[in-house]
Every structure is written in C-alpha cells, then in structure tokens.
Amino acid sequence: MTMAKQVGDARTWIRGARLVTAAGDQGTADLAFAGGVIEGPTPQGPVDVEVDGSGLVLTPAFIDPHVHLREPGFEVKEDLASGLAAAAAGGFGTVVSMANTDPVIDEPGLVRWLIEKAASLPGARLHPAAAVTMGLGGTTLTDAAALKEAGAVMLTDDGIPVSDGEVMRRACEWAADLGLVVQTHSEDPTLRRDGVMNEGAVSERMGLPGNPRIAEASMVYRDCAIAAFTGARVHIAHVTCREALDVVAHFKERGAPVTCEVTPQHLSLTDEAFASFDPIYKVAPPLRTQDDVDALREGVKRGVVDCIGTDHAPHTRDEKHADLLSAPFGIANIEVAFPVLYEALVKSGDLDLSALLRLLQDGPAHVMGWDAPTLDVGAPADVVLLDLEAARVVDPSTFKSKAKFGPWDAQTLQGWPVKTWVAGHLAFDRAESGR
Ligand code: DOR
Ligand code: ZN
C-alpha cells in the first residue's frame, strides 16, 4: 500500500567517512548510492555528486517511532512539509506520526491521504500511526484491520491515555491478531489530574499542581500486564521515572512482548527547569528528578530501554508563552535530538557511539517490527553524515520546524547531523542552511 518515496537520481559517492553502525566502527571507507539504494564502496556507473566525508561519521539515517506532525488540522504548529524537513535536519530518515490531529487519524482514508501526501514531499519518510479509539474518545475501537490495510504501522491514542482497561484489552486482542504494535501514553488520568509538572519538592516549592510518578508507573503496569495477557506487542512511549522503568524491566524479564522508549528531554532535563516558570518545559509525562534521569540512563545502558522516541511536539510560540497552567504540553526537539543525546549519553561516558546509534536505528526498527537499517549493498540509501567534533550554538531561527524555540536554545552542543539523504535524495544539507 505504501507509496514509494521519490528516488534520488544523482549517483552520489561519499569519500573517506568513518562508517559506524550499531554493530560497531567499520573504519574509514567510501560509500556510493544510486537509484535510491546503496551500491557499495565503489560506484557502479558515472558519479554525479562526490562528497568529502573526511572527519565525519557516516551511518544509516535514524528512525523515530514518535513524532507529532500536526497535519491535518494544526498546521499552524507544524505540517507534513515542515515536520519531515525538520526530521531530515535531525538526521532522521523515517518517522512515525501520531494520530492526535484534527480530524484524528481513525479512518483508513486519512491514513492513505497522509501516506500519499508525504510521498510527494522531500524530507524523511512518513509511516502514520492510527488511533486506538475513534476520535481518541477512549470508548469505541477503530477498525484496526482496515487501518493496517491502509498503511498504518501502529495503533496509539498518544496524547491521551486509554483510561478504560477493557478498551485497552480489546484493542490489544485485535492488535495481537493483526501483528500491529500498540503504543501507550501511560498516565492514569485519575492520578494525574490537572498536574502541570512532576509532583515533588519543586512543585511544592512553586505551588504548582503536581503529576505524580505513580500515575505513570501504575498505568505502565496495567499496559504491560495487558501485553503479557493478550500477547500484543505493546510499546510504552516516553518512560520518564524510575518506578515505571522498573515495571517495564519486571515484565521484560518474564518475557512479556513489551518495548519502551525514552525521550531526549527526559534524559537531559529535570523538574528544576521549572524554577524559571517557563512553560517551554511543560510536557506530558513531565520532566522528573535527577534520580529519574539517572535511572533512565542506567536503563539505557542495561538495555531495558529499546529506543529513543523524540516525542517532537511542536506548538506555536503564543501557545507556549501562555501561563504555566494553560500552556499546552509538548517540546519540539527533533532538530537538536542527536546533539542532546550525544552530550547526555556519549560525552558523559555512559555509552559509546554505536550504542547510541542502536537506540536510533536497530532499536526503533525492532519496536516497529522492521528490518534494522544497514549500509549494505542494496539497502535503501537513507544515510546521515554526522560531525561529532563540531560544537554549535543552537540557533532556533534556522529550524525547519515551525516551532522555532526550545529548551536548548543558545546552548552550545556537540555532535550534529550535517547531511541527510533519504532514498538517495539529499533531504538536508547544513551547509546550504547556513548553520
Ligand atoms: O507533551 C506532550 N505533548 N505529551 C503528549 O502526550 C502529547 C503531546 C502533544 O501532542 O503535544
Ligand atoms: Zn507524543
């Protein structure tokens, strides 16, 4: 069903880059691609574009199982063109878009429309998720079989927890039959209430309504238990606290078909950021404490965490500049995700580069049930060149995303994507963007 991405015509030869994948460092080599696929170290015909890769790392473009591209309905925040361009600028070749648009992606026609529209755009490849329940209403299941047939790769009500356990159970029973992954936004609404930040010392100090970690941990337990019971592949989105990660580890140890992701923001920021009263940090589930950040990093090291999901969640500046109580939840991050992760996980000494790449390549592919991306002959020419030495000041005015602001603005970060190709097309070139 999936409409093919337009294939890049130019035979491209990247010379002298260091090839690194999740499998390890393969040393300095050349890589040629044409017709949208990798040809190997040597071009199989006349070269159109030669790229000097010296001093750079060449690796498969990243996969993001969790982005909000806002089209249809919220194009003022982001649209397919800006979101897919932003993804490519972040080094991502493939993204899974969430269903909390307007209308909600709960009908096969909408899935087909998204796929067709995205295929005609430059930037990353799009695989849409579809909703678990009609209109994200939490009561009536969508037609998962028809949605899958139309090209939906995941079921999720992300943004809103599926609060009714029976609905979640039946959705997982269908999904298990269909082999579809169900992604959860695990926060018990009756415990979360109107919390705008993590419940703890900082929320008490600031007098702001807190969202307690038990809201997350208890629903992660329910969702993992339903996965174990139904046999459905359940993917826990944005795990943020120690207790929730412990629950995932518990179920994984017992062989439950559960995977989980963490976000760049939850690996690098804490609720102390709220001392500024800046709603830019308002996200659901919330930024937690340093102990939680430590737990997530340990979970990444131990392999409990399967992958990174950015949860790129753009909103307008006006919306995010509202007061803390009324501003929407969400952080736009896809263009800085890699340097944020490189700083937090690799420069910190927690992971080597290959282990970080695993979280952005093999890990999300495994979650989705896809083949792991490679640089092998015949593989799709979805590749990214990374400059690991360059430290750059984050300049949001250069973002392709419509959300030209974020928590890392004006910070100096190291490790940046410089060129991204998707199906052999140059989908992002930092040199051209003047940044
Ligand atoms: O912070 C969030 N923003 N969490 C969600 O679950 C939804 C997302 C959004 O759509 O903005
Ligand atoms: Zn989300």
Image (tube, rainbow, N blue to C red):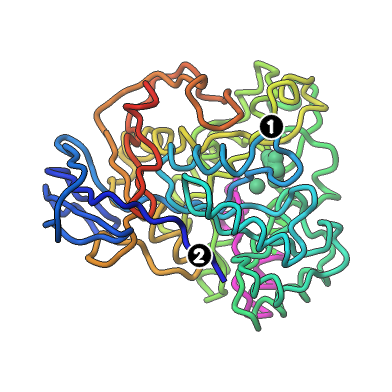
User: In the visual, does 55 lie left or right of 277?
Assistant: left
Name the residue rendered at 63%, 76% in the picture: 232
Q: Amino acid at mark 2?
A: Val
Identify the residue under disc 2. Answer: 367
Q: Position of residue 273 (x, y in %)?
A: 60, 23
Q: CA distance from mark 2 to mark 1?
A: 27 Å
Query: Which of pointers 2 and 1 indicates the residue nearer the eye?
Result: 1
As helix, strand or loop, the secondary structure at mark 2 comes to: helix
Magenta range: 222-247
Looking at the rendered structure, the secondary structure element under dot 1 is loop
Horizontal side, residue 325 vs residue 45: left or right? right
Judge the density around disc 1: few (<14), some (14-19), many (≥20) Cα neighbours within 10 Å. many
Count all numbered tags in the image, as a single digit: 2
Q: Nearer the viewer, residue 427 or 70?
A: 427
Position of the N terminus, as image quadrant, is: bottom right
Verify whether residue 232 appears in magenta. yes
**Where does ligand 1 appear, by image quarter?**
top right
